Image (tube, rainbow, N blue to C red):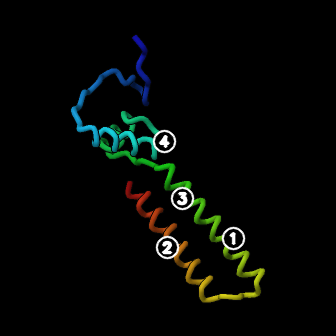
Amino acid sequence: MMPFEVRGRFPLDAIVNVRLTTDEKDRLKEDADLAGMSVSELVRRRYFGRPIVAHADIAMIRELRRLGGLLKHLYLSSNGEHAQETLATLHALKEAIETISRDHQKG
């Protein structure tokens, strides 16, 4: 028999079987994959109110910041051409980053 993983001071030595629909199981697996963790870890964290950091959110924030930097560079190198459009786009990127960050902190 394979030894159980240890979390904190105690081994994870108990198993709970739960019946789900195929769709529910698929959704749990997808959520766990997005968070970069096993289904068991995801369920434990959700049930016990521990934070879940979705790798997809972190990657998305990083990419939005990168795009904002590129847009700022384009604006500066074009001597401010299309300033209104650039500013509106930068504000939209900032709002998207803040929304993802807020949702991430609630998780």
Label 4 sits on a secondary structure element that is loop
Between marks 3 and 2 in the image, the one whose residue lies nearer the viewer: 3
The residue where tag 4 is placed is: 36
**Nearer the N terminus, badge 4 or badge 1?**
4
Q: Amino acid at mark 2?
A: Glu
Instruction: Using the image as rendered, state which of residue 44 and residue 63 is in the foreground.
Output: 63
| Percent position of residue 49, x then y | 32, 46
Label 3 sits on a secondary structure element that is helix
How far is the residue under mark 1 from the one under mark 2? Answer: 17 Å
Q: Residue at x 37, y 24 (%)?
A: 12
Q: Residue furthest left?
A: 19
| Percent position of residue 38, x then y | 42, 35
How far is the residue under mark 3 from the one under mark 1? Answer: 15 Å
The residue where tag 1 is placed is: 70
Quadrant where the C terminus is found in the figure: bottom left
* Residue count near mark 4 (Cα–Cα under 10 Å), binned few <14, some 14–19, many ≥20: some
